[in-house]
Image: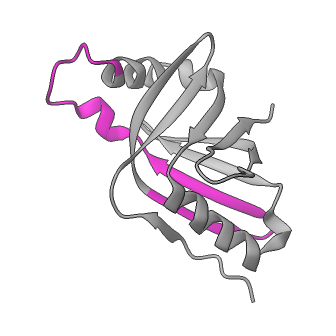
Amino acid sequence: MANDYWRQLRKTSQFLHLEYGYDHTTLSAEKAEARPLGDWLELKFDLDSNLRSRNNKATNSYLGARDLSEGQISELKRVQIDDSRVIERLRNILRNNPQVADRWRLILFLSGPHTFSVHPEMPTGQGEPLWLTVVR
């Protein structure tokens, strides 16, 4: 029987680096969760808090989130995950679900859900990031 329930990857927020169009931004991500679902690994992050910035609306995270929410998210190219705890928890899921190793679906919540098929590039060394490249 498949374990298709969402697993929490991190309780607190973390940063994701997103490359889109000809630009890039670093956003705070909350509610990091993953689940194996059939032959896929689904990975989701909530980025909406970047649009509710109480600080200066001219901050890079607010401006990047606004650009993405206004349509630039369709040009997403790559996402970089640096958090070693998140990467290790993903490795554990993959060990128990080898059928999902190469088929990942990324769901980003930013003024609604945005879903992408991505190819993961797991780090080979400690301290290296996980890259998710959008497959078009």
Residue 33: in magenta span: yes
Tally of numbered tags: 0
Hey, which residue is sitting farthest bottom in the picture?
1
Left or right: 32 in relation to 38: left
Q: Is residue 98 left or right of residue 13?
A: right
> Given the current orientation, which residue lies at the most extreme front position?
126
In the image, residue 22 sits, relative to residue 47, either above or below, namely: above
Residue name at image x 58 percent, y 49 percent: 127
Closest to the observer, 72 or 19:
19
Residue reaching furthest to the top: 22
Q: Which residues are magenta?
A: 32-60
Q: Is residue 91 left or right of residue 40?
A: left
The answer to whether residue 53 is above or below residue 132 is above
Q: Nearer the viewer, residue 91 or 62?
A: 91
Q: Residue at x 53, y 56 (%)?
A: 84
Q: Is residue 27 magenta?
A: no
User: What colouring does the structure picture have?
Assistant: one colour
Task: Say if 8 sits above or below 133 in the image.
Answer: below
Q: Name the residue located 67 percent from the left edge and 41 percent from the top edge.
A: 131
Considering the image in quadrants, where does the C terminus appear?
top right
Q: Quadrant of the N terminus?
A: bottom right
Q: Quadrant of residue 61?
A: top left
Residue sitting at x 53%, y 45%: 82
Q: Position of residue 50 (x, y in %)?
A: 32, 33
Residue 88 locus on image (x, y percent): 59, 65
Q: Position of residue 125 (x, y in %)?
A: 70, 52
Q: Work out whether 71 lies above or below 37.
A: above
The quadrant in which residue 102 appears is bottom right
